Image (cartoon, rainbow, N blue to C red):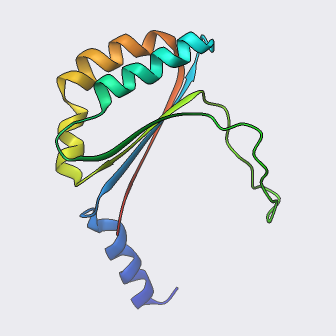
Amino acid sequence: MDVSTKSAAKGILSTGNGRIHHSIYITLKDKSEAAVRKQLELGEKYLSDHPGELSFFATVVARNLTRHKQVAYLFNEDNFDVAFHMIWADAKSHDAYQVSDAHVNHFIPQSNPNWVKIRVFDSVEV
């Protein structure tokens, strides 16, 4: 990578001014249909409709999909049960959601007793 390419890449990585994509992947202790449904309902109730939230999706793991193996190490991650996907208008609205009453005092305490593992992936549009 030449110096100009490095500078451009550094600029892209440091901007953080675009929409924020916030994805949460949760592995549950109780994987029954009722427990999965409860997680989805809690997410819908407490993680959606926040100021600056442009979209919200509550999903379950997709099983039995066909994936071409263009590269040997390509595989579908499927070690989770439910996932929530949100898009925020900006970092400010995302950060406000993180400390919101609904997120901190309702969703997390009501949901996490059934969590084995939680993974969060955040990315920003450039």
Q: Return the x and y of residue 124 as percentages of the image width and height.
A: 35, 59
Q: Residue at x 63, y 11 (%)?
A: 32
Q: Residue at x 43, y 15 (%)?
A: 112
Is residue 59 shown left or right of residue 94? right
Using the image, determine if residue 63 lies above or below residue 27.
below
Q: Return the x and y of residue 31 as percentages of the image width and height.
A: 63, 15
Is residue 97 shown left or right of residue 11? left
Q: Residue at x 41, y 20 (%)?
A: 41
Q: How many marks?
A: 0
**If the image is split into quadrants, where does the C terminus sit?**
bottom left
Q: Residue at x 46, y 19 (%)?
A: 39
Using the image, determine if residue 125 lies above or below residue 37.
below
Q: Decide which of 76, 63 is in the foreground and name it.
A: 63
Image-quadrant location for residue 4? bottom left
Q: Return the x and y of residue 79 as percentages of the image width and height.
A: 66, 32
Is residue 42 shown left or right of residue 68? left
Q: Return the x and y of residue 68 as percentages of the image width and height.
A: 80, 59
